[in-house]
Amino acid sequence: MTDVTVRQAAPTDLEPIVAANIAMAMETEGKKLDRDTVTAGVAAQLADPSRGLYYVAEQAGLIVGQLALTWEWSDWRNGTFWWIQSVYVAAGYRRRGIYARMYGQVAEDARRSEGVAGLRLYVDKSNSGALAAYKRLGMKVAHYDMLEVDFSFE
């Protein structure tokens, strides 16, 4: 898809990113997120790259996809893993290679960045379409299970 550009998000991308995060949570987990909380969280990340970055895919001035990156230090590797999160492609733009373009840009940026140990993401085990897409791009299922205590949704 040559008419799609991928770039790091800017503070002016706040509203489409918030809308996509809210849509993604409802679509993938059936969770209704509080718009004010999500807006504050996305704004904080856009304002402070130490918290992470957003990448967006844009077509004809419209944001049609996004992903977020956050960081995890690995003492075993003396390097940082980039965690891919908040992946969303608008419904009418799926299966057109948009995520692959975003992933490709992130992977290229990671390989050029000193001290990056690799890329990681988590995916709902029932999301077979996403899992297959990630595997096609060269990601492998790790032998870890994710555990959490989520104070926001107790």
Image: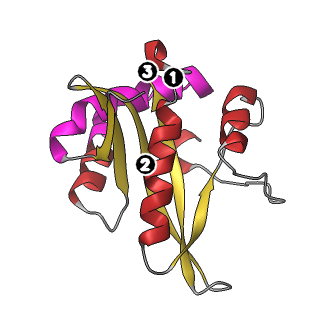
Closer to the camera, 6 or 78? Answer: 6
Nearer the N terminus, badge 2 or badge 1? 2
Nearer the N terminus, badge 2 or badge 3? 2
Where does label 2 land, which residue? Answer: 68
Q: Which residues are magenta?
A: 11-39
Identity of the residue drawn at 42% across and 32% down: 21
Q: Amino acid at mark 2?
A: Ala
Q: Is residue 94 above or below residue 151?
A: above
Using the image, tell me which numbered label, if any, was put on residue 90: 3
**Gap between marks 2 and 1, in whole Å?**
20 Å
Quarter occupied by residue 4: top left
Q: Position of residue 97 (x, y in %)?
A: 52, 29
**Gap between marks 1 and 3, in whole Å?**
11 Å
Q: Is residue 27 above or below residue 57?
A: above
Q: Position of residue 39 (x, y in %)?
A: 28, 38
Q: Residues within 10 Å of mark 1 (few under 14, many from 20)?
A: few
Answer left or right for 61 relative to 154: left
**Gap between marks 2 and 3, in whole Å?**
15 Å
Q: Position of residue 36 (x, y in %)?
A: 28, 34
Outermost residue to the top: 92
Closer to the camera, 43 or 57? Answer: 57
Does dot 2 land on a helix, a strand or a loop?
strand
Q: Amino acid at mark 1?
A: Arg
In this rendering, does residue 32 appear at all? no
Nearer the N terminus, badge 1 or badge 3? 3
Where does label 1 land, which residue? Answer: 96
